[in-house]
Each structure stands twice: as C-alpha cells, then as structure tokens.
Image (spheres, rainbow, N blue to C red):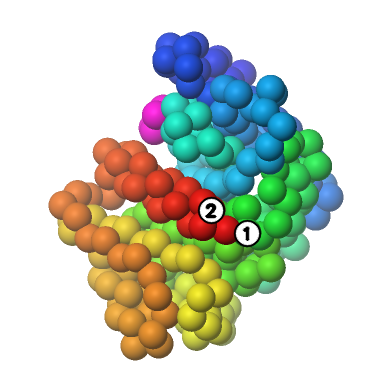
Amino acid sequence: MKQLFTLLFIACSLNLFAGKVDTVTVFSNAMQKEINCVVITPKNYKKSKTRFPVVYLLHGYSGNYAGWVKEAPQLIQKADDLQLMIVCADGGYYSWYYDSPIDPKMKYETFVSRELVNYIDTHYKTIADKKGRAITGLSMGGHGALYLSIRNKDVFAQAGSICGGVDIRPFPNNWQIKQVLGDISTNKENWETHSVINLADSLKNGELNLIIDCGLGDFFLEVNRNLHQKLMQMKIDHDYTERPGVHNKAYWGSAIDFQLLFFRKWFDKQ
C-alpha cells in the first residue's frame, strides 16, 4: 500500500501534461499467484484512436515493480513525449527473470514474456506484435531483458541493458543466483546455458535492435565489454555505450532516457 501511495504522489507531483500511472495486478497461471506491475500511458491515451508501442522495464536485484518510477520519475513525462507505453514488470526479489530449472514455483520468464505481454495486449491499445515491443532493465533486469529477448525473439523486436549482469558465471555467490540455478560446482550447465553472453551465440544480425550501456566504474563493466566484443566479432549490429558512472540510480536514471529515444526511433521506422 505504501508503494502505491508513493507512485500516486509522484504522478500528482509531476507536470499536468505528463502520462498516467496505473498499478495493475496480473495473475500468473504459471506460478499461481498475483503479481503487481506498473503501466504508464500517455496523457492522450484514452482519446487516441491509435495503438501504442510498449517498452517493458525490468528492475534489479532486491527491487520490485515500483522501483523504476520512484528512481526515474521522468518516465511519466517520457511516455507522453515519446507517445509510447511503459510497463514496469515485477521479477521478484532474486529471480533473474528465469524459469528456474531447480525451483518449479519460479517461472518469471514465462510471466514476463508471455503472461504479462498477453495481459497488456488484451487490456490496452497496444501494437500487439513484436515490432511494437521493446524490453530493457537495470542490473539483474538488464540481464533479464537480453535473456528474455534472445530466447523470445517472436515476442520482442528490441532489447536493451543498463549496467546488466550479462555474464553471471564470475559471480557464483552473489545476489542469490544459486537459489535459482543451483550451486555452480554441481550445476555448471545451468550457469552456462543461463548466461546472456553464451545465449548470444544464437543471434543473427538484425534479429534484435540492441542497445547496451554500462558505467566506467561499474562492477559489471568487464562482462559488458566482453559481450560487446563478442557481438562485434559475430558482426551483430548493436549500440554500445560506456560513460562515467557507477552502479546506482543516478546512472540508470539517466541511461533510460537515451534507451527510450533509441527504441522510439526504431518504432518510427516500422
């Protein structure tokens, strides 16, 4: 309830010409539970006869669906300025957006890429096609956005990552990943097959419109550089940025503005 009041306060405090923020509850059949998500629509949404593209935003480790709007409140105005919808999914405390191979109750890949997308397309005026969808996120969510988009290229046409943990293998004891994949010493294959840098092998140029961003002082910088180098070797077109900054809300609060514009430009070409 406190999170809902916070979101309402942020929405009311911003420019009257900004978009609208709703908190929706989506039932996950895969996990048999209700999950809260934030939906931001442009101010002219109700009166508009057009359908809108959607950008899905994923939060980081220990975060939740309300995090993006609290840490980057300009998103409400951006939805209006860029004429798109923004959906902030909830990925649990430490899911890493996996369908866990060891915990059958954790199916966040299914929830975000199937159940949530279907809910949004059913209840809102969206472009219900992959050409009308992008997905990005911060940290755990940056990993999740690339992981989900590569594995669900029929759902998403664009994907981004901000300070993303794009290779989880160097961090076997961090952020409760082993509670989702098992200990790396006994479940090495899970860690190999669930790392974005390895999934990139399945990409073909042009399948996804990609943007990757990481700060020069970020502890994920090396794995992001490795992914960038791999994509260049594979001749996979992508936008890659390194800027001064560390792993904090100031960095991803700024980076998301560039990524939304990047997605909007691609939507406009379709």
Q: Name the residue carrying label 1.
A: 131
| Residue at 34% across, 39% down | 253
Q: Position of residue 195 (x, y in %)?
A: 49, 74
Residue 246, above or below 17: below
Q: Is residue 57 left or right of residue 13?
A: right
Image coordinates of residue 135 in percent, x first then y, are: 54, 54
Please identify the quadrant where the N terminus is shown.
top right
Q: Position of residue 142 (x, y in %)?
A: 44, 57
Magenta stretch: dominant SS? Answer: loop
Question: Which of disc 2 and disc 1 is earlier in sequence?
Answer: 1
Tag 2 residue: 267
Q: Nearer the viewer, residue 160 or 65?
A: 160
* Number of residues whose C-alpha sits closer than 10 Å to that of mark 2, classed few (under 14), some (14–19) or many (20 or more): some
In this orientation, which residue lies closer to the viewer: 142 or 131? 131
Frontmost residue, 270 versus 171: 270
Q: From mark 1 to mark 2, how far is it between C-alphas?
A: 7 Å
Q: Magenta residues, as a range?
A: 70-74
Q: Amino acid at mark 1?
A: Lys
Q: Residue at x 30, y 41 (%)?
A: 254
- Image x and y of residue 28, in percent: 78, 47
